[in-house]
Amino acid sequence: MRVFSPLRHASAAAALMTALLCLTMLGGELRAQDNAQDDTTESQARQVIRTITNTAEARWNFEGNPASSLSNEVTFDVTLPPPEIRAFRPTAQGPTELSFQEPVCSALTRSGQATATVPAVANDQTIQPLNVTVEQTTILRAGQTLIFEVQALAANTDPNAIDELEIVITTSTGDREVETIFETGPNTGVFVGQIDTVRIPPAPVQEDCRLSLLDGSSIAIEAMAPGSTDVLVSTDVEVLADPFGVVFDSETGEPVS
């Protein structure tokens, strides 16, 4: 004769529902910050957007009698992934194609004529996006166009519109440029911008919407948090020092080893 224990079956069902609840909550894109395998620094850097508290209930019939049991209560934070900046350079056969709206800044036009700041018209459907084939890089040559992509879901403030993001670019040569870049589409959380670079001389001029560079200098790209002066995320790009170039003595004009 086999004896069935209602208590034993209720405990087993409750344990099963607890396990299923935990697996369901931690599936997909949601991650619990109290997971022991999470990196503490990474978790602290993520923005908490909501906290979820839930329980699971198991119901069953045993010998014609209904029974039920509740799981333990589970609470965890839902966080955004940390922001990131990736730098690119244009290439004819690059593995990546970017489509984005040209950034806005107080700039010189490509013909060299000074112009006033262009008003931001991110949601103007008549604006044609730029389509550029690129490859990711951390090194740039002076004279190349610097293209950068900012992935920042925290800056996606309006899911129904194309949001803007302020970018501050500085160089070790003393240049400083400020741009407004735009989301690649409503609710993407991805922003793309670009800026031209030129070789020194002439001396750098701040706020001319181009970076004046020397071989071996560095570029810092900072994305500012929306409505704040705080830096949301930053990255550095190095300027390639040509090993085959020639350095001259400024007084004698003789080549230096």
Image (spheres, grey):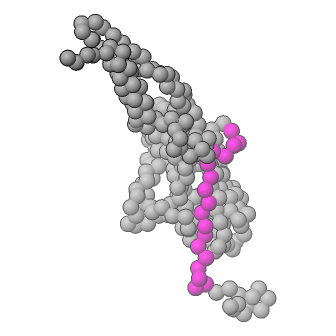
Residue 230: in magenta span: yes
Can residue 140 be seen here? The reply is yes
Q: Residue furthest right?
A: 251
Highlighted magenta segment, given as a residue range: 228-245
**As drawn, 184 above or below 201:** above
Q: Residue furthest top?
A: 65
Residue shown at the point (51%, 35%) measured from the top left: 32
How many labels were placed on the picture? 0
Residue shown at the point (65%, 66%) measured from the top left: 218
Name the image quarter holding the N terminus: top left
183, 105: nearer the viewer: 183
Q: Residue furthest front?
A: 1
Can residue 191 be seen here? The reply is no
Residue shown at the point (59%, 82%) measured from the top left: 243
**As drawn, 152 above or below 242:** above
135 horizontally vs 219: left or right = left
Q: Position of residue 47 (x, y in %)?
A: 58, 37
54, 131: nearer the viewer: 54
**As drawn, 66 above or below 33:** above
Q: Position of residue 256 (x, y in %)?
A: 70, 90
Residue 73: in magenta span: no
72, 241: nearer the viewer: 72
Q: Position of residue 93 (x, y in %)?
A: 38, 66
Name the image quarter holding the C terminus: bottom right
Q: Position of residue 141 (x, y in %)?
A: 56, 71
**As drawn, 234 above or below 34:** below
218 horizontally vs 140: left or right = right
Residue shown at the point (68%, 62%) measured from the top left: 171
Quarter of image, res 155:
top right
46, 165: nearer the viewer: 46
Quarter of image, res 216:
bottom right
